[in-house]
Image (spheres, rainbow, N blue to C red):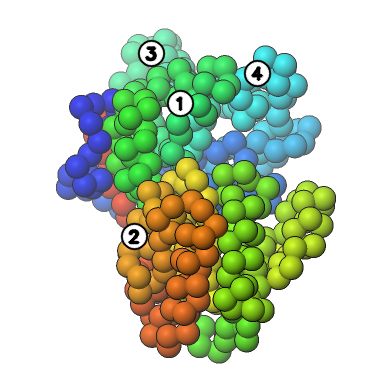
Amino acid sequence: MSAADGPVADGRPAASPAASPAADGRGTDGAGASLRPTLLNPVFWPEVRRGSERAVRSLADGLVARGHRPRLVTSYDGRLPRYDVEDGLGITRLPRVASRYLWRTVADDHAAHHPLATPLLAADPGDLLHAFYPTDATLAVRAAAAHHALGVVRPGGRDRRPPVPVVLSVMGPPDRAWAVAVRGRLEGLVDAARAAQVVTTLSRFAQERVWRTFAVRSEIVPPPVDLDAFCLDPATARHETPTILFASDPAGGAKRIGLLLDALALVRTRRPGTRLLVNRPVDGTLGRRLAAVDGVGLVDLDDREVLADAYRRAWVTALPSTNEAFGLVVAESLACGTPGVAFAGEGPAEVLTGDDVGRIAPEPTPASLAAALLGALELAEDPATPARCRSAVRGLGVPEHTARTLELYARAFAAVR
């Protein structure tokens, strides 16, 4: 879906018949053939472990489980290209050969690997290009066009294969300030989105933001939650003292850890002894400042099993961020049976669908957030809360997300034939 008259009414695509393999051998899920989609993200594990990296990994797991052969093209801080296979996902990591030049010219340094990625993808884009970052969307459109042009001029006559379709997943709610902060970012995102066959966003909040800012229409596809890893465990009890978990990166300004600390002080006047566990930041100075606050402890949450255990043992997971497209940590927390707290008007408010699974603070103030946290702490004491929380996210599993993505892949193939 490219630019159109407005956002999709309900975020769901029209029903699509299962596609059949193309004449050139490109497979599709509906015909039992194996697809070879190429996923594009500028960074990946273990270097970065944010929401988009987890979404890419989970989608790859779902595709592999259905017999497809996904690969990921990304970048890393190394000197030579590297290829690995991790749990069925082929990963090509390319050096960031142009980062210093891009920094000098105020361009997005997430494009630093493009000089190597462009010829690689032009030669072999796979069956479909699926980009998870705006610069990678530009890369995908450019590589798809180059691949098609190479086929047209191939000796022996015109190449009859259809162009390689492009899917763009916008993993945040980009606004104009973000788009104009870096040279070429606004134009690149708009041009790539309009050239792509399908554009997706994570929530209605993000969908409306993308439409208002860029006049680009999109489908709503929430990120996948690994409901096998993030699950209830009756053998794991909550902490004895009321405990709030902050599982996001505290170094991110949009996550508003300072606002949460102010709210914690108010909560502790009503419920003395309440603790806040914060994901340990990479910045040691920030970590020491946080650890010096009364009631705050630091925890290492890089390991998925450790993170799931932290969700289960916490009483509440807090995400006081602004400009949040979805809030994966809230969904993962609910899957583990722990209620969440977020602010109204943001993506997480679409995940916390009722007062029986969390609280929505109506305004971004310490008092409003503290009231929401206190309400959620009371909710955690209800024995029926874990089951209700788990039920709220039962439709966000990896198989459901994979099936939804394959529906859109089929639409993308149909659009280029």
Give x and y (percent) for residue 26: 35, 38
Give the crowd class for mark 3: few <14, some 14-19, many >=20 residues within 10 Å: some
Measure how far apart labels 4 and 2 are at the Cα level: 40 Å
145 shown above or below 57: above
> Which residue is at a point 39% across and 71% down the rendered structure image?
357
Which circle, 1 or 4, is nearer the viewer?
Answer: 1
Check disc 2 and give the amino acid type: Glu
CA–CA distance in space, label 1 to label 2: 32 Å
Q: In this view, does 9 lie to the left or right of 374?
A: left
Dot placed on the residue nearer the N-terminal end, 4 or 3: 4
Which comes sooner in the sequence, label 4 or label 2?
4
Relative side of 354 to 61, left or right: left
Q: Earlier in the sequence, mark 3 or mark 2?
A: 3
Which residue type carries mark 1?
Answer: Arg
Element carrying mark 2: helix
Amino acid of disc 4: Val
Residue beneath the point at 52% across and 21% down: 180
Q: How far apart are marks 1 and 4 (CA)?
A: 17 Å
249, above or below 254, in the image: below
What residue is shown with label 2? Answer: 400
Instruction: Identify the residue at image location x=61%, y=73%.
Output: 269
Considering only order in the chain, which callout, 4 or 1, is on the residue closer to the N terminus?
4
Q: What residue type is labelled 3?
A: Val
Along the polypeptide, which appears first: circle 1 or circle 2?
A: 1
Residue 239 appears left or right of 36: right
Could you tell which of marks 3 and 1 lies nearer the N-terminus? Answer: 3
Residue indicated by mark 4 = 106
Check the picture and name the quadrant holding the N terminus: top left
Instruction: Say which of marks 4 and 2 sits in front.
Output: 4
Badge 4 marks a residue whose secondary structure is loop
Q: Residue at x 45, y 26 (%)?
A: 176
Q: Name the residue under label 1.
A: 176
